[in-house]
């Protein structure tokens, strides 16, 4: 009996401790991963977007917004990412726009309006927002986040002095890997199933022509025709899939003379591993795709 009471007390204390941790709310997985790395277990990271949904299009409910409003730090990606943040009443003193430091390097995009299943119709007009796919920019975002976490949660200062250099070292290594392994793809056009890769292309000298396909869905006959025509026009024989396609899709592309690789931009959590391991694998897969 005494043993059970002690165990219950320990569990209650652990739960209370978790609830007492300061909260860092984020709008996408890359920022959630950074906050987890920076906090070292001393913070609770709130990333409420359900698995399988696109965080850039997700719209929070009232309970989600209420929870985010209470966070000590609210980390935004900037560059127009997650438009709901501009329409919600969030406390300005707790918000950090992690990409504002390089806003002069944002990439303008053309106006393209289309729909994505349950996410509804949306437009890509304005600014490319997947800023973290330039890993040097991702390092700047991590620094902006760390600065705000130290300001709003001063007791993290000693932890951040250790975790920020380690995080930035990992991102620098990822940047170096991309520069080295993707160098062999310069000079050839790569096709992509969705316009997510503008910063990846600019940072690592790639030419990427994007289609407008729904992630994870089997392309229609019209889309296969579109791919064939774009491949012929661009002389492109490599296709980046934003998410793993249905069975048979990669084989059909292969029959058209087009090699495939999945390069998830990781706006949401990967099924396995974390941001660092998944990106390392994606870079290597992309570099080796034309050799398979």
Image: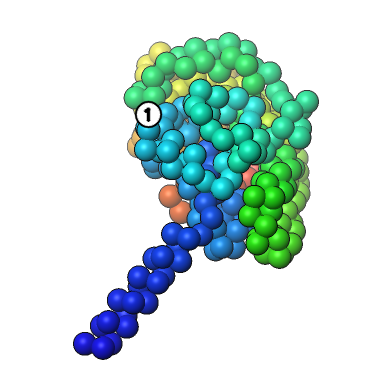
Q: Residue at x 43, y 42 (%)?
A: 67
* Relative vertical location of residue 288 with respect to residue 125 in this rendering, above or below: below
Q: Residue at x 63, y 45 (%)?
A: 283
* Location of residue 153 (image quadrant): bottom right
* Relative vertical location of residue 125 with respect to residue 264 in this rendering, above or below: above
x, y (%) of residue 123? 51, 15
Give the position of the N terminus as an image quadrant.
bottom left
* Location of residue 22 (image quadrant): bottom right
Question: Helix, strand or loop at disc 1?
Answer: loop
x, y (%) of residue 209? 61, 22
> Considering depth in this image, is 34 or 245 the residue closer to the camera?
34
Is residue 127 left or right of 63 when viewed as pictured? right
Can residue 185 be seen by looking at this rendering?
no
* Relative vertical location of residue 239 with respect to residue 167 in this rendering, above or below: above
> Considering depth in this image, is 193 or 292 the residue closer to the camera?
193
Residue highlighted by disc 1:
217
Is residue 212 left or right of 100 when viewed as pictured? left
Can residue 6 be seen by looking at this rendering?
yes
Q: How many marks?
A: 1
> Considering depth in this image, is 33 or 271 the residue closer to the camera?
33
x, y (%) of residue 208? 64, 26
User: Mark 1 packing: few (<14 Cα in 10 Å), some, or many (20+)?
Assistant: some
Q: Residue at x 40, y 13 (%)?
A: 222
* Location of residue 30 (image quadrant): top right
x, y (%) of residue 93? 63, 38
Q: Residue at x 48, y 48 (%)?
A: 46
């Amino acid at each position: 009996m005494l043993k059970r009471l002690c165990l219950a007390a320990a569990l209650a204390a652990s739960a209370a401790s978790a609830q007492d941790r300061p909260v860092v709310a984020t709008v996408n997985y890359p920022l959630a991963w950074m906050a987890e790395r920076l906090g070292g277990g001393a913070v609770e990271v709130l990333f409420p977007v359900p698995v399988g949904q696109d965080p850039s299009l997700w719209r929070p409910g009232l309970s989600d917004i209420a929870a985010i409003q209470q966070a000590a730090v609210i980390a935004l990606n900037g560059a127009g990412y997650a438009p709901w943040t501009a329409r919600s009443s969030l406390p300005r003193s707790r918000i950090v726009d992690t990409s504002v430091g390089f806003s002069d390097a944002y990439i303008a995009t053309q106006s393209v309006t289309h729909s994505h299943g349950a996410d509804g119709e949306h437009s890509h007009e304005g600014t490319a927002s997947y800023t973290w796919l330039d890993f040097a920019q991702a390092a700047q975002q991590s620094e902006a986040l760390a600065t705000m976490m130290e300001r709003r949660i001063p007791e993290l200062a000693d932890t951040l002095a250790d975790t920020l250099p380690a995080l930035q070292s990992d991102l620098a290594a990822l940047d170096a890997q991309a520069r080295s392994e993707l160098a062999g793809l310069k000079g050839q056009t790569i096709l992509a199933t969705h316009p997510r890769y503008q910063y990846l292309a600019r940072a690592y000298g790639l030419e990427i022509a994007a289609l407008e396909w729904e992630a994870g869905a089997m392309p229609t006959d019209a889309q296969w025709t579109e791919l064939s025509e774009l491949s012929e026009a661009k002389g492109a024989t490599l296709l980046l899939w934003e998410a793993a396609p249905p069975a048979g899709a990669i084989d059909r592309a292969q029959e058209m003379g087009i090699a495939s690789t999945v390069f998830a931009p990781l706006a949401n959590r990967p099924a396995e591993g974390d941001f660092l391991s998944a990106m390392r694998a994606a870079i290597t897969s992309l570099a080796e795709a034309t050799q398979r």
